[in-house]
Image: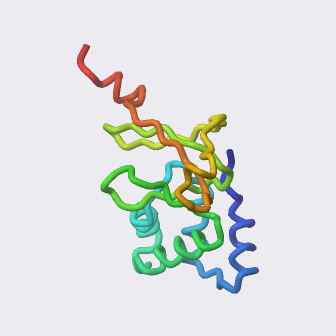
Amino acid sequence: MTVRALEELIELLRQNGHKITPQRRVILELLSQDDSHPTAEQIYQRVLLTMPDISRTTVYNTFRELNDLGELTPVHDLSEGGQRYDTHRQPHHHLYCVQCHKLVDIDHDFEGLDLAPEDTSGYQILNRQVTFYGICPDCQAKRPS
């Protein structure tokens, strides 16, 4: 799975009527290099290192715009650190460490996971996402034997 390249993100925003400011460019650059499922706040804190006068609103608005365009996908119900976003657009699933909160993409098809129409309670299913919760190898190595 790959994250869309920086120039592709810039072109997509331009095509949809968004200006590419220096602040937005830095946000897009960070997102195009990040597969850690960051929160908007985490990206804001990283942008602050190079652009100390950037507003939090600029980062959150850019996340909203990318989400509206299908370039970011919210990852639900993981930790209390804020809404995390997935930069990979292809359908996939996750491994989540309950200790360090690391979130890793897995590309695995779970045959039979679809719901039969009679089991959807009338919902139109738009997406599915499986998250396995566990303890990552790094956290396991830190545990006393």
Quadrant of residue 52 within the rendered picture: bottom left
Relative depth, front residue between 139 and 44: 139
In the rendered image, which quarter contains the C terminus?
A: top left
Residue drawn 60% across the image and 40% down it:
113
Residue 67 makes an appearance in the image: yes
Left or right: where 1 falls relative to 39: right
For residue 144, above or below residue 88: above
In the rendered image, which quarter contains the N terminus?
A: top right
User: Residue 61 appears at what percent x and percent y?
Assistant: 50, 78
For residue 143, above or below residue 2: above
For residue 48, above or below residue 86: below
For residue 35, above or below residue 134: below
Q: In this figure, which colouring scheme has been used for the structure? A: rainbow
Left or right: where 100 falls relative to 57: left
Left or right: where 79 falls relative to 47: left
Residue drawn 70% across the image and 72% down it:
10
